[in-house]
Amino acid sequence: MKRNAIIIAAGTSSRFVPLSFEKPKGLVEVKGEVLIERQIRQLQEAGITDICIVVGYMAEQFAYLKERYGVQMVLNEDYAKYNNVSSVIRVLDKLDNTYICCSDQYYAHNPFLEQLEESAYAALYADGKTNEYCLRLNDKNQIQDVAVGGADAWYMAGYAYFNSEFSKQYKEIFAKEYADEDKRQIYWEDVYIEHLRELPLMRSIKMADDELYEFDSLDELRLFDKTYLTDTRSTIVKQICQQLQCQEEELHTFRKVVNGEGQTFAFMHKDVKYQYKNGEITKC
């Protein structure tokens, strides 16, 4: 069975401030490897060489991957206007026996080596309450329903795999949904959830917490790659340290500012909260 892969890398990763102001999150180095490069290599090791990357935000920074890895590039000009459905619509014709991946995920072991036959979605377990997309599974580990939010449940995380039968039906549904501009602010998973009972069953691939890592913030990345405590690789953070006369490890709790203009985010220096806005630092 010939398989292909789509890696979605168009978004701004606004929660990953300030690093996301300088480069797309998929190009961040983690434990000596660039996130998207690690994923490409894992796909290729599994014999998947037909790889398409959907880019948008800072698209030019991904260009080197074409020559280095022989991947295809598709530009999503609407990345800032719509949600990830605007990335999927641009590669809808490529859906067959297809992995759909996110550029910023780190797999400790290669998950693409398994030869899947039925469609699947990777999942992590939430111990306690969560706002993630929680799964209700049958005794065959197949997804029966999905609810936003829950507790003590498996939830959607990581890659998805569509087999050709699933892709054929999903493409027809997706194209009709995308024609409605009001539905372009949703995720491609929302289209799946809304039409779940019309589509072939998709099973859950249960992953351990130490198999899949998703870094929603610089603080989360620092827990996994401790080199970021002393060197964030960020010009912005180094400028802050110069102004505050401090070390990088003294800065923490980096958060985006809702409706902030330009390069704006909040952070803590020890126990004091500051705001950075386009080069200016003020106490909050």
Image (cartoon, grey):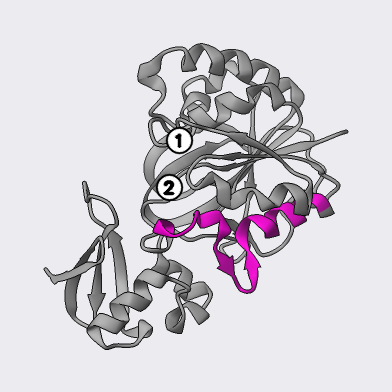
Badge number at residue 79: 1
Residue at the extreme left: 284
Q: Is residue 124 visible?
A: yes
Image coordinates of residue 15 in percent, x first then y, are 36, 55
Say whether residue 99 is left or right of residue 192. Answer: right
- Which residue position holds label 2? 12
**Residue 39: in magenta span:** yes
Badge number at residue 6: none
Point out the tag, 2 or 1, that comes first from the N-terminus: 2
- Residue nearest the viewer, comparing 110 with 68: 68
Image coordinates of residue 236 in percent, x first then y, are 36, 69
| Other-residue count near label 1 (Cα within 10 Å), few / some / many at <14 / 14–19 / ≥20 | many
Report the amino acid beneath label 2: Thr
Report the amino acid beneath label 1: Tyr
Q: Is residue 176 above or below residue 9?
A: above
Magenta residues (range): 20-44
Label 2 to label 1: alpha-carbon separation: 8 Å
Q: Quadrant of the N terminus?
A: top right
Q: Main secondary structure of the magenta part?
A: helix
